[in-house]
């Protein structure tokens, strides 16, 4: 018995020694493999070179010098190294569906348009229709935009305005409430007329969906199998005519933001994406003394499937002359609205409108209460008073309140757009695009050459005549050359920017 017990003890000692030595041996092997450069992958090699849907195979980045704003220049120490040498080819999405067109009306500069445009290229947008005026129509801006594959630039010329003056819209009632009013109302009508033309242009280009966005809005394809608006819309039921993206509103945490797309990560969620008890229960804390839960609009933006009889229904929705569209509202995806993100946004709105800074007169210019209040402050207060007002009403500098609302889900952090835009900048995409567009810019600046040499510029004379006819009678107008339906639906009023529900609306939602 003693000898048997001794043998058993020895066996246990050998087993214990083996169990001790095995982890040490494996650790030493792993260290040796890593030291030799084998067995452990370089993290940059794990990611496919075109991890986002709008990206082609990488090419070495070009970093030319540029006179553009610093906001477009790459940093010296890249912080987003996994997708180097981003490049975009006009043929990269040739066989991919659905094809998505984004249309905008803008007067912004390259420092805003290029990050907005290439972010949407990254997430799968195939075509951009840019109706430009102001800064956006200047040769050094428009020339660069025209040189970008997949971009069409339409100028607001006298000829364009004459064609739009013959639009069937003027003979109908759905937009009539916005006619012949200044500032925001005028912009709203102009956006609708541009959207009407864009439908025809997008259909001729073979697009499947069209979305109207402003250049201070980014699509956020939450809920898609990949970070792709194309994948998101591919999963929409075939009988859906319109898809509504509820909007989230930027919540800036500083008063010195220079590049909103790269510096803002906190957003206030839409009513549609919150439990009703949370929304109304936290309403006062989330509003912070402002007229409404959001500073500006709260009814989102929409994408429309391109089909017969499609028409705009104001800047936020689409409609159809022949039927009531079947619409769905997305439960996770959103439009990120970067509104009043810079202190200078106060004065820029003031400078665009000629209304008197009185409570009565601003109602002629602005549809939303906060816009009216901001215009009055910007028109009557000193720089110091404006900055104080901006910090009180716009800037989220109370960290304890921010944390509380983040925990409740009213506020949320979204970092992916920041990473994409910063990655684009550091990879030299913006500076390369500006450099590549210089020949077009030079052509525009040359007194011997005209804009007609630019292949991506669309003049009013090039807009398909299917949209415009000489006869002004609405009964003879047929958008998209469609067959005349039995009943034309022209009584649905255009949907303006609407504020989210207020506490007074609480009983309607309970």
Image (tube, rainbow, N blue to C red):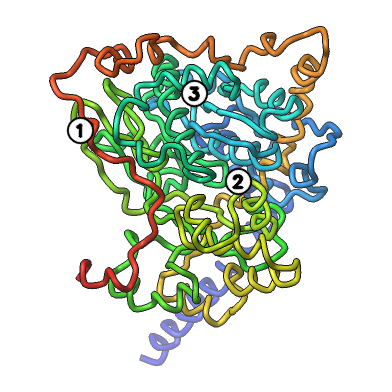
Tell me the CA gap for discs 2 and 3. Answer: 19 Å
Query: Is residue 8 shown left or right of residue 308?
Result: right
Q: Residues within 10 Å of mark 1 (few under 14, many from 20)?
A: few
Residue 283 position, x and y percent, is: 39, 75
Residue 7 shows up from this direction: yes
Q: Which mark is residue 247?
A: none
Which residue appears at 39% of the width and 77% of the height?
Answer: 282
Which residue appears at 56% of the width and 16% of the height?
Answer: 159
Q: On the image, numbered disc 1 is attached to which residue?
A: 239
Query: Is residue 376 shown left or right of residue 84?
Result: left
Which residue appears at 70% of the width and 56% of the height?
Answer: 344
- Answer with mark 2 or mark 3, whichever residue precedes in sequence: 3
Nearest to the observer: residue 103 or residue 350: 350
Mark 2: which secondary structure? Answer: helix
**Image quarter of the C terminus:** bottom left
- Is residue 391 depicted above or below 67 in this figure? below
Image quadrant assignment for residue 6: bottom left
Q: On the image, numbered disc 2 is attached to which residue?
A: 420
- Is residue 30 depicted above or below 177 in this figure? below
Q: On the image, numbered disc 3 is attached to which residue?
A: 93
Which residue appears at 60% of the width and 47% of the height?
Answer: 353
Nearest to the observer: residue 54 or residue 361: 361
């Amino acid at each position: 018995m003693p000898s048997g017990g001794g043998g058993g003890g020895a066996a246990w000692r050998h087993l214990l020694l083996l169990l001790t030595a095995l982890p040490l041996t494996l650790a030493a092997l792993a260290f040796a493999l890593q030291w030799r450069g084998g067995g452990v992958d370089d993290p940059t090699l794990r990611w496919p070179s075109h991890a986002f849907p709008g990206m082609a195979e990488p090419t070495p980045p070009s970093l030319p010098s540029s006179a553009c704003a610093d906001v477009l220049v790459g940093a010296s120490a890249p912080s987003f190294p996994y997708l180097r040498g981003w490049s975009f080819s006009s043929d990269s999405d040739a066989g991919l569906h659905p094809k998505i067109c984004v249309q905008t009306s803008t007067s912004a500069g390259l420092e805003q348009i290029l990050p907005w445009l290439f972010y949407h290229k990254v997430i799968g947008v195939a075509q951009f229709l840019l109706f430009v005026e102001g800064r956006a129509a200047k040769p050094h801006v428009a020339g660069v935009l025209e040189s970008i594959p997949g971009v069409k630039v339409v100028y607001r010329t006298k000829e364009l305005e004459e064609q739009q003056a013959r639009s069937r819209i003027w003979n109908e009632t759905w937009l009539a409430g916005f006619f012949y009013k200044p500032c925001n109302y005028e912009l709203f009508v102009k956006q609708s007329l541009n959207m009407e033309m864009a439908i025809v242009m997008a259909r001729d280009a073979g697009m499947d969906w069209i979305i109207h966005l402003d250049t201070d809005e980014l699509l956020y394809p939450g809920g898609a199998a990949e970070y792709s608006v194309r994948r998101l819309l591919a999963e929409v039921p075939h009988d859906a005519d319109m898809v509504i993206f509820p909007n989230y509103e930027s919540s800036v945490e500083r008063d010195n933001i220079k590049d909103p797309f790269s510096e803002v990560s906190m957003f206030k969620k839409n009513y549609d994406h919150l439990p009703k008890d949370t929304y109304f229960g936290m309403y006062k804390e989330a509003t912070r003394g402002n007229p409404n839960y959001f500073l500006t609009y709260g009814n989102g933006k929409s994408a429309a499937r391109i089909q017969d009889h499609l028409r705009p229904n104001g800047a936020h929705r689409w409609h159809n002359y022949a039927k009531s569209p079947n619409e769905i509202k997305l439960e996770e995806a959103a439009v990120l609205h970067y509104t009043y993100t810079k202190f200078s946004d106060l004065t820029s709105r003031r400078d665009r409108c000629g209304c008197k800074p009185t409570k009565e007169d601003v109602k002629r210019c602005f549809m939303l209460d906060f816009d009216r209040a901001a215009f009055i402050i910007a028109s009557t207060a000193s720089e110091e008073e404006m900055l104080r007002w901006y910090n009180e009403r716009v800037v989220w500098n109370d960290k304890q309140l921010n944390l509380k609302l983040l925990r409740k889900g009213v506020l949320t952090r979204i970092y992916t757009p920041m990473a994409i835009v910063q990655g684009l900048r550091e990879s030299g995409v913006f500076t390369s695009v500006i450099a590549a567009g210089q020949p077009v810019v030079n052509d525009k600046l040359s007194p011997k050459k005209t804009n007609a040499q630019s292949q991506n510029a669309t003049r009013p004379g090039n807009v398909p005549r299917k949209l415009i006819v000489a006869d002004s009678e609405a009964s003879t107008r047929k958008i998209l050359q469609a067959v005349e339906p039995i009943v034309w639906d022209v009584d649905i009023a255009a949907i303006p920017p609407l504020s989210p529900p207020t506490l007074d609306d609480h009983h309607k939602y309970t």
